[in-house]
Amino acid sequence: MLQACNLPKLAKKEGPFLYKNKIEISERQEARVFGGNLDGYIKQRPNKRLLGTFRHTLRFYKMGSKHPDTWLGRFYQTKLGDAPVILDTSLIESTVKGMRGFLKTEGYYYPEINFTVTGKIHKKIVTYKISTGKAYHIYRIEQHIADKILDSIFGLQKDLSYVRLGKRFSLENLLKEKVRINDQYRNNGYYSFNKEFVKFDFDTNVGEFRSLVGIKISNPENFQRFKTYKISSINIEIEPDKIDSNQLGRDSINLTNFIYKPNTFSLNPEVLNRALIIGPNKLFSNENVNSTFGRLNELQLFKSVNMTAIPCYENTDTPTVNYQIKLQPNKKYDFTFEPQVIASDQSNLVSTTNGRNYGFASQITLANKNIFHNAEILQLSYRISVEAQRGAAIPSRPFFNSFESNLTANLIFPKLLFLSNIDKSWTSSTNRSLITAAVIWEKNIDWIRNVYAIGFTWQKNRKLFNQYLVPCEISYIRTNFNSTELEQQSANDPYLQSVFSNNLITASRYGFMFNNQSDIRKKHYTFVKWDVIELAGTFVNLAYKLLNIAPSDSGYNTFLGVQYFQYVKTFADMRYNRYLDENNRLASRLAIGIAMPFGNSPNYVPFDKRFFTGGANSIRAFLPRSIGPGSYTDEGSLDRSGDIRLELNFEYRFNIFNHFLEGALFTDMGNIWRIKNDGRKDAQFKWNTFYEQIALGTGVGMRLNLDFLILRLDASIPIFDPREPLGNRNVFYKYAELDLLMKNTIFNFGVGYPF
């Protein structure tokens, strides 16, 4: 293929090929701030490159050009290839003009922009050399607001202004200030105000790169003054179903805050009353109108919400606004059936091996919206799965030997239960309460486990920032042996005893999530999920002390006949995705957590609350649960869990073909540790040795991006293995021969990006 695609020869025939654009800004601060913005003004982009160098689409185009009249040739040219980008100096000049205009809007009126074209005929590099020069700064602001009341309101939020003394003069900031002023007045009752009434004058001829800015807000025509509007009435109608559109709907109901016409829809009007931030005799506020619109949508009962404002000018001294709100109901029932293919990581406690299970699952979910006519949503979900657990010591019959049955019920309330005053005051967020109950039955070759769980959660959700508080969560786990060999091993193994003893967890949790990926204006995005604190057993233990209840014969307190756990845990998952260009991204993740047992369970936290590492979404160069804690190396160890987790991942993602086929280069590092000394050498976290126990791996990956689903295959190799003796942990030398490289390569199949 490389021999067939002689690019220099093709360039001599077609013209010089654009290979790369570069921007060099002499001022360091301006380069950091404006580099990405100036890149957006480049009018001509080179052909796509794989790994930054290989122009695969151009080579496919050249291959297809040899046989343009055949199906294969057209496929190469139009589907796999791109026509060569011929360097166009007119587009370069247009780019320079656009860059100059942009810098002027940012206050740099006299930039120097030059360009050079270098490189071979098939690798022309255009370098834009920019010196922004000095920027104009605001040294004086003059305010001309004809209405004294508007002038006083403006002064209330002056500290939020985008136009301030000493700031760089920027047209973008002037536009932001116009929007801010408009919002400020419309949130204070001025319904007829709009941003066209805000004018700016500026003068840059006062010398020394200083600018004078004038803010002018005139009164309306005919010397009138702006007036504040109050809301007169609110009419809410739930549109009847099309099937019943010819039937006579219910009569309207006159309530305290609105007129309600439910027609054939049964909904307690108090639900709508809680959603309304606007109300009769309240001052008009555009912010409250938007909040009301959002809260009505977030009830999930309506597929459309239409709010129409009707101003009333009959009494010119006290103008009013009437609101007509029409709600179109959603379907009452949602039913989904989801077949699944499973590829899960699991360790076998008997053979002390790690492997991957494959199987099938089906999940059925039924949702009833407005079940009790108060906008509650009941979700019932049932999942059943079968997997083939494999290993050297596992019989091949039956083929499917791992089963799970899971029944979950969620009841969602559109308010903060028991916190009515707080619920009313938090008008800028979506507030919910959630009651969850689950029953899980699992069976594999090692054990049979039953899990019973119930919990209560408060949620406060905003556009980018969501919080949750779980005041009470109780789970009871009962495990029985399904392997005689494992049961015998557990007799003298404290770890296995902690795993298979009946577990009772009474916990409270608080956490939050920040995610600005939904903001389409941000090419870079950040995701943070922090389970700030999880505290278990404390309230039960406090009650036992207050009631002066003596411990059981084992020396520990029991609740419902079972020793309950006490621990405190925190875990944070922080991700940053950086946009390089339309075909390349850099993704990174830091995962860090700690769980500390104490009190009634001083040695271990529950098995389900411990940390594990390795596998498809962790350190991919190591099998799941095959490393740690620390550099503990006993091959017969059954405990590959820890109380501390530290992990760092980097991944370079690039487009190969039409964003359907993507590639990745990645590096993963990290490990887990025990927080207390349990007698095992090098398993405990220590500040002076932990960095010597970091596992490191690297690899390559391929992804099929189907829009609704991403299928992923990663191949990786260990570089630094903490299981090896100190001094021999750099294992890269093992891959000198191809057969050793393949033997040590770990393949991981997954769904979705690893982070």
Image (spheres, helix red, strand yellow):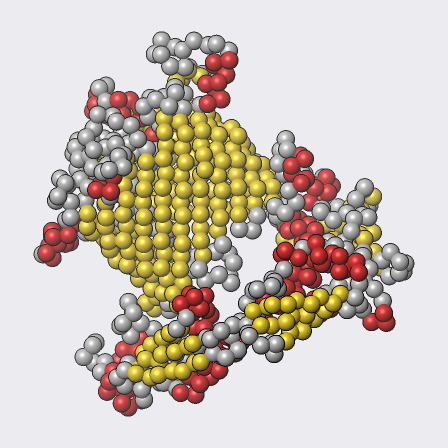
Left or right placement of residue 197 versus residue 66 in this view: right
Residue at the farthest bottom position: 13
Left or right placement of residue 506 versus residue 219 in this view: left
Q: Is residue 556 above or below residue 85?
A: above
Split into 4 quadrants, where in the image is the N terminus? bottom left
Q: Position of residue 223 (x, y in %)?
A: 85, 69
Q: Is residue 48 above or below residue 727?
A: below
- The tally of labels here is 0
Left or right placement of residue 751 versus residue 103 in this view: left
Residue at image point 23% right, 50% down? 697
> Within the image, what quadrant is residue 678 found in?
top left
> Within the image, what quadrant is residue 460 found in?
top right
Mark yes or no: residue 751 visible.
Answer: no
Q: Position of residue 423 (x, y in %)?
A: 65, 38
Residue at the farthest left position: 737
Q: Is residue 299 above or below residue 65?
A: above
Q: Position of residue 531 (x, y in %)?
A: 44, 39
Of 501 and 114, the residue lying toward us: 114
Q: Position of residue 518 (x, y in %)?
A: 51, 56
Of 244 and 518, the residue lying toward us: 518
Mark yes or no: residue 731 visible.
Answer: yes
Residue at image point 75% right, 46% down? 262
Residue at image point 63% right, 47% down? 428
Residue at image point 66% right, 57% down? 158
Residue at the farthest front position: 208
Of 726 and 403, the residue lying toward us: 726
